[in-house]
């Protein structure tokens, strides 16, 4: 069960990040200034990030912006194909598995980039900041566990 929960969390995070990146890529402006400002202000306040840390983290993310955008769009496209395959009349198990495998490949590629970014960003953070992030991730996991159970229970009632 925990493996499927992690998958759901990763999927939700990827879709959220991909959606934001996609919106920013499509309008070319990087999104509304208030979104960018609020996000960094919240991170600075909650994690106690210094201005120097924010600058360094932004530089790491900026260096991978094109790759992040491409991978997020590729994942989104693969999910659309999977959904269309699932909904297609007369679809076979093999077709669904092939479409799902493409989603897996795209998720894997994005996960590799996330790991690369983690390796370059985490050394910029203090042990206390890393602990706060881990605690937040634990809270998110618990929330998603509960949300999934609630959703499933409501669906089958």
Image (cartoon, grey):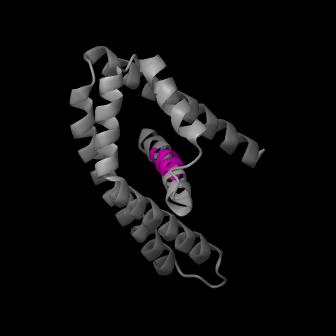
Q: Which residues are magenta?
A: 10-17
Nearer the observer, 76 or 34: 34
Q: Looking at the rendering, which quadrant does residue 104 occupy? A: bottom left
Residue 133 position, x and y percent, is 39, 25
Residue 69 locus on image (x, y percent):
42, 59
Figure check: 73 above or below 24: below
Main SS category, magenta section? helix
Give 94 or 88, whichever is nearer the viewer: 88
Position of the C terminus, as image quadrant, is: top right
Q: Does 11 lie within the magenta span?
A: yes
Q: Is residue 11 left or right of residue 61?
A: right
Q: Residue at x 53, y 54 (%)?
A: 29
Is 46 colored magenta in this rendering? no
Q: Is residue 7 left or right of residue 20?
A: left
Q: Residue at x 30, y 25 (%)?
A: 52
Say if 48 sits above or below 7 in the image. above
Q: Residue furthest bottom?
A: 90
Residue 128 picture location, percent across and down: 31, 14
The residue that appears at 33% across and 51% down in the rendered structure is 111
> Residue pushed farthest right?
157
Q: Say which residue appears at 52% left-offset and 38% top-offset.
A: 36
Residue 85 shown left or right of residue 53 in the figure: right
Q: Is residue 113 shown above or below 83?
A: above
Question: How many labels, in total?
Answer: 0
Q: Nearer the viewer, residue 74 or 43?
A: 43
Above-or-below relation of 47 to 121: above
């Amino acid at each position: 069960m925990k493996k499927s929960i992690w998958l759901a969390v990763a999927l939700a995070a990827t879709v959220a990040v991909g959606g934001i990146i996609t919106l920013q890529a499509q309008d070319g402006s990087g999104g509304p200034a208030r979104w960018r400002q609020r996000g960094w202000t919240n991170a600075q306040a909650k994690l106690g990030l210094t201005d120097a840390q924010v600058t360094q983290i932004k530089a790491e993310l900026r260096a991978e912006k094109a790759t992040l955008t491409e991978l997020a769009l590729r994942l989104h496209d693969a999910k659309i194909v999977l959904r269309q395959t699932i909904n297609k009349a007369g679809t076979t198990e093999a077709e669904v598995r092939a479409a799902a495998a493409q989603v897996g490949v795209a998720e894997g590629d994005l996960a590799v980039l996330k790991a690369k970014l983690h390796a370059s960003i985490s050394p910029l953070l203090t042990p206390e900041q890393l602990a706060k992030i881990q605690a937040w991730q634990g809270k998110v996991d618990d929330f998603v566990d509960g949300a999934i159970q609630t959703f499933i229970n409501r669906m089958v009632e």
